[in-house]
Structure formats: C-alpha cells, structure tokens
Amino acid sequence: MKHFIDLKEIPAKDLRRIIDDAKKRKRDRKKLNNLEADKEAPLKGKLLIQMFEKSSLRTRLSFYLAIKQLGGSALTLRPDELHLSKGGESIEDTAKILSNFGNAFMLRTDSDKKLEEFKKYLSIPIINGLSPSSHPTQVLSDVFTVEEIKKKPISKLNITWIGDSNNVLNSLIDASIKFAFRLNIGCPKNYKPNQKIMNYIKSNKNKIFIFNDPKKAVIGADAIFSDKVISLNDKVNKKKKLKDFNNFKISTNLMKLCPRAIFLHCLPRGTEVDEKVFKSKQSKVWQQALNRVYVQKSILLYCFGKLR
C-alpha cells in the first residue's frame, strides 16, 4: 500500500512508471466506451471513496471514470453530511470507518494538516486530489500531456509558468526537480514562491529560474502553463492582485514569442488568458483535462501495488 500526497515524497522512478503505464492504458482503450472496464479489470471489486471539501469538476469526473475503467466503483461523500464536520467526530474515528468500508480514499481538502492526519490513521491508501500546498495529480497528468504532444521526454523540454505562486506551481516545481526539466517562472516581484519553497529549490539540483518579465520567461518555451490569478477562497485584495498581474496576461503577442509552445491551463480559467489564445491551435486544454483519467488510473494502481 502506498499513498499519493506530494510529488516530492515519491521516487522519480515510480513517477516515471506511473506515466509509462498511463501511456499504455490510453493506447489500449481506443475501442472502448467510457464506462467499459479495461480488459483485465485490475481493481475489480475495489471501492474508491472520494470527499470534496472544495469545488471540483475535472478531479471528480476523472477519478470516477478512472476507478470504473479499472473495474472498481466510486462513492462520493459530502463533508457537510458527515459527523466529521457536523457532529465533531474525530479524523481518527472517521479514518477507521473509511478503512473498513473502502479500499482507497481520495481527498480534496482545504487543509494540508487534515491530509497528514488522515494518512496517520487510515489503513488504506490516501490520494491528494488538491490541497492548499500542492496539486500532484494535476501536474503529473500535465507532464504526461506535454510528453504526449511533444513526443519527447520532459527532461529535454523547456516549461514556462506564467502566474501566481500557488499549489499547482508548487507541484510543478516538484516535477521539475524529479524529472530534471527546465522551468521558467514568470511572476511579479512580490509573488514569487515563499521562502520555504525557495530554500527547497536551492537545496536540490535543479533548472528553475524566476523572471519578473513574462517576455523573458517564455523565450524558448515548449509549453506555457497558467492558472487563475484569483484562486478559490483566495483571501487577498483581489482588485490589487489583478492589477499587479496586468502585464502577465497570456496574450497572442506573448505566444508569438514562443511559436512552438503549447498552452496548458488546469482550469477553470479567468482573465489571465486571452480568449484567442485559449481557443487557438496552440491551446491543448481539453486534451490536458481528459488525460487526468489515464494518469489517475495509474496512480490508483501505484497505490494498490498493481502497476504493470
């Protein structure tokens, strides 16, 4: 049994195995419908319990399809219906019940501490579907998408992030260190990663560079990543923050500086990208979203010790 909470905790060779398995599984499903199980149904009889403390569309849909295609089932719990939030039941007691009824637990949460507490008391794997500090399932799927489109290992590609320093960027930094690819971060001066992340970058062999000019950040890029400037439940002066990011919009002029680059966005989108860019040939956001299914299938198999 293995957990999937943070990319930095998982050996690079295991992350590579997950991506390679996902590539094979995507190829093998060309003639199958969404709800048809993979030929060997490796997780037949297994139940994935999901709980969402934050809004979700892609993570919810992709994990549901992932477990179904592996032959298992999914049950989604609403936190406001549980004793955990309503009746003050402890995480320890909740975790023991989840372990008795389910075979894996996927949590999308507003608390990193809660993830660690569940991990402590669960006797089944836990998967981080998003937390304040990281979004590992999203970013591993993004690595898959870049390699699929560019037909090269990501270690040979240049990746650029334009936007805020948030949980998605944190996981992208983890991925850059694990897979040894160049990562340019374009953000305003006061929005670079926090000191803990900066120390982590400096303490690892890496190819991570920070630019306060988006034009410099995109030069030579094979892929441009972005995310909403104002994240869900972002407790900031939103008007000021949007103004600070005025010059960091993904525009057609910016994309012209990196003509071979694809554009990726974890969604939902905001004002950080021009409509023309979002709907352009360089934009691969729909392929990116669908690929969540294939990578999350392989993440589930990794947690169960059943990777091919």
Image: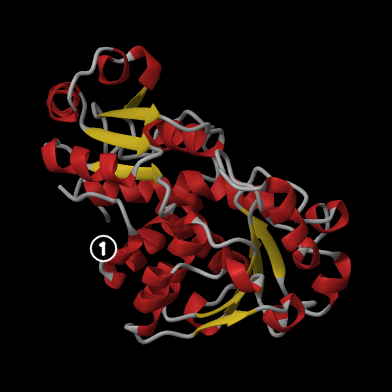
Q: Is residue 25 visible?
A: no
Q: Is residue 257 above or below residue 225?
A: below
Quadrant in the rendering for residue 221: bottom right
Residue at x 26% of width, y 52% of height: 302
- Name the spot of residue 5 as percent of width and height, x first: 30, 51
For the residue pair 248 and 11, the one nearer the viewer reads as: 248
- In the picture, measured across the screen, residue 184 lies left or right of residue 140, that is right
Residue at x 30% of width, y 15% of height: 82
Residue at x 75% of width, y 66% of height: 248
Q: Secondary structure at mark 1?
A: helix
- The amino acid sitting under disc 1 is Glu
For the residue pair 229 and 21, the one nearer the viewer reads as: 229
For the residue pair 36 and 89, the one nearer the viewer reads as: 89
Quickly name the residue at label 1.
9
Q: Is residue 93 visible?
A: yes
Quadrant in the rendering for residue 284: bottom right
